Image: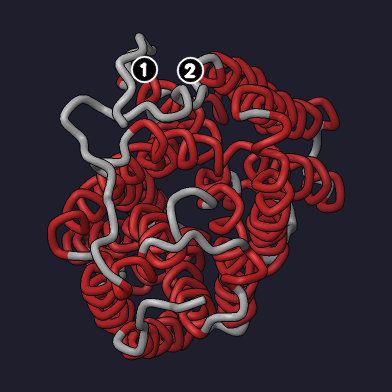
Amino acid sequence: MISKQKTMNRNWVILGAILIQLCLGAIYAWSVFTPSLVKAGWSNLQTQIVFSTGLAVFAIVMVFAGKKLASWGPQKLAFLAGVTLGAGYLLTGLAGGTHFWLKLIFVGIIGGAGIGLGYVVPISVGMRWFPDKKGMITGLAVAGFGFGAMGWVKLAGTWGNLLNKYGLAATFIIYGVLFAGLTIIGSFFMKYPPEGWFPEGYQPYKPAGPKEQKSAVNFKPKEMMKTMPFYLVFLIFTFTAGAGLMSIGLMKLYPMEALQTAGKSVEEASAIAGTAMAVFFSLANGIGRVIWGTMSDKLGRKYSVLIMALSQGIMMLVFTKMAGSQVPLYIGAAIIGFNFGGNFALFPAFTADLFGDRNIGLNYPYIYLSYGVGGILGPVLGGMLGDLGNFNLAFTLCGVLCLLGAGLTMMIRHPEK
């Protein structure tokens, strides 16, 4: 039965989701700080440890947030996310300097926890308001996460010049205030629709027979984790996310090295690599979330994941030949960013397709733990091999794993209880 009850315009949910995700995407702007930290004496590995810690804590806290979503409500959870994320960056700025352990605690642990508290909220709320366009709304709900990196990188760099004008500590303080304020504003729109509400003209799916009834079942987390599709999806997401996260962590350091080897000056290499990360990768990352999500509503989630993993694997392998030239670097960064963004539109909707819409807020955080695994393995692998002078091998290994993920996608079948 379709409810005729007056409700909030569901487009406000999109606005709130984008505001929240713009701030949660702060973790992807970490690369703008890494050259300053390396100059201050950090190793490549140390820069990636902070990044990886933030990603891992993000994924772990997201499981906790999914469990609290029903009892605390999406508004409260999003509000708490803004306060926590803002506090992490504010504290690291107030602490000043480039102390590794303080950055690890404030940015990696506290900042990562703030992201984990808020990330599942727009996805869960969005799917309730847009059951007719799951892929599209998931893509829009997480698009800000990708676009946010471009904005924060450029604000610290060429647009706002915050790092040069005010220094590292003050930039962290400014970001902490902005993250808290924008996320709290977005939290006002994070409300579920009334029970029984559906958009006008939408007819809820009614299973016609035994086969359809099985596909309409809503799995609980423990039931989901007893199925083979859960582990296949987990592995695929680990491989594709790990490749993209390693690329984010190295998208400035690696091209700078490759461009200087090709004859560019340090200043030229820094400007070109910064544009590759802040514009081409980040913009494509945000666009990819919307396009992959919308496309998957027509093509199907399984084949969309297959195409995404396959093309990402190929691009990671050939990127080692592209990083030292400006135009090929921009093209490679854009394609890697585009495919990486697709993960965050495809896997929430794929989870809902396989295990049901009703428990997506509980189930998806367990799938998303694979992002935390990839966030540790990918960047740490890149940092270690980078310190050994072999960035090429890091990209090659990640490319092979993405191709393996494409093969695993073909094994996925709809689970039965």
Q: Secondary structure at mark 1?
A: helix
- Across and down, in percent, residue 292 comes to 23, 55
Residue on which disc 2 sits: 189
Which quadrant would the N terminus be assigned to in this image? top left
Circle 2: element type: loop
* Image position, residue 392 (x, y; %): 42, 83
Instruction: Report the front residue among 228 and 320.
Output: 228
Question: At x 61% / y 75%, what residue is drawn?
Answer: 225
Along the viewing direction, whichever of 327 and 211 lies nearer the viewer: 211
Q: Is residue 324 visible?
A: no
Q: Amino acid at mark 2?
A: Phe
- At a point 61% along the width and 36% down the height, the residue shown is 118
Marked residue nearer the N-terminal end (2 or 1): 1
Q: Are marks 2 and 1 in contact (CB under 8 Å)?
A: yes
Residue at 61% of width from left, 23% of height from top?
A: 75
Instruction: Report the number of numbered marks.
Output: 2
In this view, the residue farthest toward the front is: 209
Disc 2/disc 1 C-alpha distance (Å): 6 Å
The residue where tag 1 is placed is 12
> Compared with residue 326, is residue 370 higher up or lower down, i.e. above or below?
below
